Image (cartoon, helix red, strand yellow):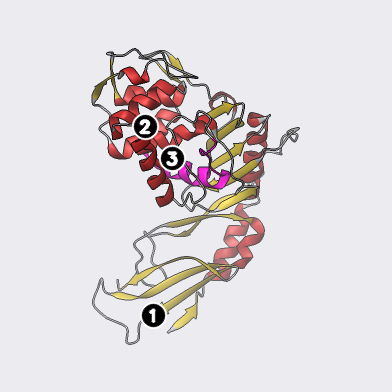
Amino acid sequence: MKHKSAVALLFVACLLSLFLTAKKPLRPRAATEARGECIVEVSSRRILHEKDAEAVLPMASTTKILTAILILDDCDIDEEIEIPKEAEGVEGSSVYLRAGEVYSVRELLYGLMLRSGNDCAVTLALHHSGSVKAFSAKMNEKAALLGAEKSYFINPHGLPDARHHTTARDLALISSYAMENETFREIVSCKCYEPRHWQNKNKMLFSYDGAIGVKTGFTAAAGRCLVTCAEREGMTLVCVVLNCPEMYERTAELLDSAFLTYMMVDLCDSSKPWEGYAVKCDFSYPLKKEELRSLSFATELSDPLPVIKGEIAGQMKIFLQNNLIFSQNLYII
């Protein structure tokens, strides 16, 4: 048995009223756009903005987002490790590690993400995999699992290599996954790591309302690159700009526009019955005001309907413009 939800029209009408709340006007446009741009809402992975988001580009030190999350997924961050000779004096940005010194993995992650330490990146790669080459292979495996289909990693830090590249969309997906890790969020949102007096280079943390990370990057080949995560009114967005001369200004403009245009809407609440049946998962989704009228809801019940509490009674489904965006089982209460 299949029928449309009887409460759908009332539900949508209530949602429309939520958009009446005044929001801040947009700031003046940045003078330049990025070579590649993408905004993703973290929980749903819905893409809210794209411009040349599939263009294959170098990404400089934003590479370290993947390095950090791979370490966090696989390593004990409180383990202390000795700095190897190979990590001393690595080209580019550095926290000036010296061979034989002892740091915890956690400390090295702060040096990696706040100060963009290439020496931290090499140390962590060697700790994880034994060599930069082996670690890069693991980076590529992880990127593929996260849906970053056009990315390829040669090193853990982002120093120039013609084979080392990503896209704005791929980097947004990688960063969204990373921002779901509590420790990663804690690190990249830290303005200053006091034990080592390392101040975060990411100016968005100091200038943009709601910014909680994540990473800057620059090389002559990649240009200015920035990945930013910001939270407002229950919505968490990741914004990627690659090769963008005004990376801070353009990021702020893009995020302002997304926060003004979309809002996070609760479409399913596990604490409330769905037409007399229990659901076990919550579901929220970023929507434009005009999209609310394009939502539709369906309930599909088993025939015959079970009678024992906890048995599956059928499924509920939510559609946006006839595209299925969510479904889950319904249970007898």
In front of the other: label 1 or label 3? 3
Q: Is 65 located above or below residue 13 in the figure?
A: above
Q: Is 127 located above or below residue 192 in the figure?
A: below
Under circle 1, the secondary element is strand
Residue 114 placement: quadrant: top left
Query: Rounded to the nearest whole Å, what is the CA distance between mark 1 and mark 2?
Result: 54 Å
Query: Rounded to the nearest whole Å, what is the CA distance between mark 2 and mark 3?
Result: 24 Å
Residue 179's tag is 3
The amino acid marked with disc number 2 is Val
Q: Quadrant of the C terminus?
A: bottom left
Q: Quadrant of the N terminus?
A: bottom left
Residue with the mark numbered 1: 301
Under circle 3, the secondary element is helix
The amino acid marked with disc number 1 is Leu
Is 151 a magenta residue?
no
Under circle 2, the secondary element is helix
Name the spot of residue 315 as percent of width and height, x first: 39, 73
Q: Residues within 10 Å of mark 1 (few under 14, many from 20)?
A: some
Between residues 96 and 282, which one lies in front from this camera angle?
Answer: 96
Residue at (48% x, 55% y) in the render:
284
- The answer to whether residue 316 is seen in the rendering is yes
* Part of the protein shown in magenta: 162-183
Residue with the mark numbered 2: 132
- The answer to whether residue 110 is seen in the rendering is no
